[in-house]
Image (cartoon, grey):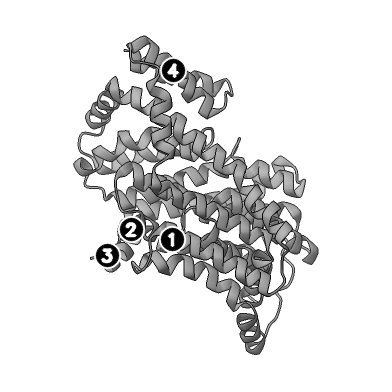
Amino acid sequence: MIGIGILILFLLLVVLRTPVALAMGISAILGFFLAGHPVQMIPMIMQNTVENSNYLAIILFILVGNVANATKLSERIFDFAIVMVGSVKGGLAQANILASMIFAGMSGSGIADCAGLGIVEVKKMTDYGYKPEFSAAVTAASSVIGPIIPPSISLIIYAILANVSIAQILLAGLIPGLFIGMLMMVLVYFLAATKRVHIPPPIRTTVREKGVSFCKNFTALLAPLILLSGFAFGVVSPSESGALAILYTIIIAVFRRETTWKKLYREGFMASLLPLAQIMFILAAAAAFCWILSREQVYVHLGNIIISICDGNRYLFWLLVNVFYLLNGCFVPGIATLVITVPLFAPLLPQFGIDPLQFGVVIVLNDMIGMVTPPIGSGIFIMMAITKVKYEALIRNLLPFIVMLFVSLLCLVVFPGITTILPRLIFQ
């Protein structure tokens, strides 16, 4: 009864717009007090959580993304994408999506993609004649790919909570991320071919120009490859891959004189402190909150309710999970959602015959769709702040991409092989 009460208190605080980490902390303290557990245990639980060495990968992946933004690496990736696909219908919009797919191999965060690379993408698209609202919509939608293609902060947290291999869950997101990106590029081609949106003429490039651009930007393209290949083939751990990618990016940027040490320190390392502190505080507060929920057997009771409702029906379980995460993704940060809910759902997966790798990718995609879903998806407001476009105009241009994201989600649920084939091939 105490557990259900603090869970209701947490939801009430979230509805009242209390910061999620603070809502979990207040609920946990009250729960410890009412249940008679020593409140002194809370700092110990929080400290043990942030000292988990597996979370080092998150720190390094955030640093990689910010270091890339502090150099001209993100601009070079976008310039390369323009040359490669600029001649296709939808030109720069296609390049926007391709660049997001490449940059996703470094940032691991949808917000980093949206706010970092997004500034470059929107400016170049609008300068070429694209409407700001369409440019913002493409950028917001393509940023969803960031936490799916490895590295991924959300997938690392899921792996730790669900007790699955970090390397395997990261690889499980690679094919789905590419699949989502390709579907978006098909959608842009359709919108351009049917003239449903105003799209300027494509940028014509020759095979020679493509070759020159590849050679010129090869060092930038090599960065995500280093990050991915290291842990994919078992040469280094995901954390070590992040450290190598940071070192490589800094060396290349300094050698090419694309940044200064002052800019690297300010925009690369110092800019990483706030998001790192926020993530670690959420993880620490969520650990204390989840401890009291587990102690009071809230997860057991809710799990039994879910089992009785679904009655062994896998697709009914998937429907319940997807609706929950989609709605939740619009209001609660994805990291907090994962920490609270994965201990509930992970033990139920064997009963429904669902692979934990597939489940992890699907729920992270759900949270990312929530980031760009009205009324209060965080990605929407980031793009509004960057582009100064009106809310209604952005939503109108974003709707076709949201539909395509739902199609992607349905495919990942119905065809589990999309997520499981790559890690199974490499690690078995």
SS for tag 1? Answer: helix
Cα gap from disc 2 to disc 1, whole angstroms: 16 Å
Callouts 3 and 2 close, C-beta under 8 Å: yes
For numbered disc 4, what is the local secondary structure? helix
The label on residue 311 is none
Residue at 68%, 63% (x, y): give it: 71
Between 101 and 85, the residue placed more toward the observer is 101
Residue at the spot 31% in from the left edge and 37% down from the top edge? 345
Query: Amino acid type of disc 1?
Result: Glu
* For residue 221, side relative to residue 297 (left or right): right
Mark 1 or mark 4: whose residue is earlier in sequence: 4
Between the residue at mark 3 and the residue at mark 2, the CA separation in whole angstroms equals: 8 Å
For the C terminus, the quadrant is bottom left
N-terminal label among 3 and 2: 2
Q: Residue at x 39, y 51 (%)?
A: 361
* Quarter of image, res 197: bottom right
SS for dot 2: helix
The amino acid pointed to by label 3 is Phe
List the residue tagged with mark 3.
427
Q: Position of residue 339 (x, y in %)?
A: 40, 36
User: Which kind of residue does numbered mark 2 sit on?
Assistant: Gln
- Say which residue label 2 marks: 168
The mark lying in front, picked from 1 and 4, is: 1
Which residue is denoted by mark 1 in the rendering? 240
Tag count in the figure? 4
Expressed as whole percent of the image width and height from the top left, the position of residue 70 reads: 68, 59
Q: Which residue is mark 4?
A: 29
* Disc 4 versus disc 2: nearer the observer: 4
